Image (spheres, rainbow, N blue to C red):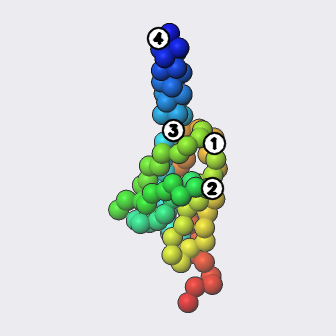
Amino acid sequence: MKKIKNLVLVVLFFATATILAQTKISGIVLDETGQPLPGANVVEKGSSNGTSTDFDGNFVLKVKSNKGVAIISFVGYKNTYTAYTKGGDIGSIQLVPDGNTL
């Protein structure tokens, strides 16, 4: 019985650590004129974890670690890589038009 109790405690500890390890990052995506870009993609680099910006260009993304890189993309613009070191607001991200579009 004591072994089962210890096993349950270890499993609960790791489950809690995994849940608490997730962090939220947020920000706003802007175009070259400073206007919000609704529908821009924000993805955690190295994963398929991502979200899209809302009508006002705002986003909130749950990331798996406290530091990493967010990739921001939108059709007609160059991808932007933004590093984050802890959760919270990573600020305004201004995308640059891609000169190779038709």
- The disc labelled 4 sits on which kind of residue? Met
Q: Position of residue 31 (x, y in %)?
A: 50, 68
Residue highlighted by disc 1: 67
Disc nearer the start of the sequence (3/1):
3
Kindly identify the amino acid type of the residue bearing the numbered disc 3.
Gln
Tell me how far mark 3 sits from mark 2, CA to CA.
Answer: 15 Å
Instruction: State the SS at label 1.
Output: loop
Q: Residue furthest front?
A: 1
Nearer the N terminus, badge 1 or badge 2?
2
Give 31 or 84, whichever is nearer the viewer: 84
The residue at which mark 2 appears reads as 46
Residue 35 versus residue 19 in the image, above or below: below
Give the mark, 4 or 2, whose residue is nearer the N terminus: 4
* Comes first in the chain, label 4 or label 3: 4
Residue at image coords 51%, 25%: 11
Q: Residues within 10 Å of mark 4 (few under 14, many from 20)?
A: few
Foreground mark, 3 or 1?
3
Q: Which residue is mark 4?
A: 1
Quick check: marks 3 and 2 in contact, CB under 8 Å?
A: no
Mark 1 touches mark 2? (CB < 8 Å) = no
Q: Which mark's residue is nearer the viewer, 1 or 4?
A: 4
Asked whether disc 4 touches disc 2, contact meaning CB atoms under 8 Å apart, the reply is no
- x, y percent for residue 32: 54, 69
Q: Residue at x 45, y 57 (%)?
A: 51
* Image spot of residue 58 (x, y percent): 42, 55
Q: Quadrant of the C terminus?
A: bottom right
Is residue 82 shown to the viewer in this render? no
> For mark 3, what is the residue?
22
Q: Is residue 12 visible?
A: yes
Quadrant assignment, res 67: top right
Inspect the image, locate mark 1, and give the three-letter code of the amino acid beneath it.
Lys
Q: What kind of residue is marked 2?
A: Gly
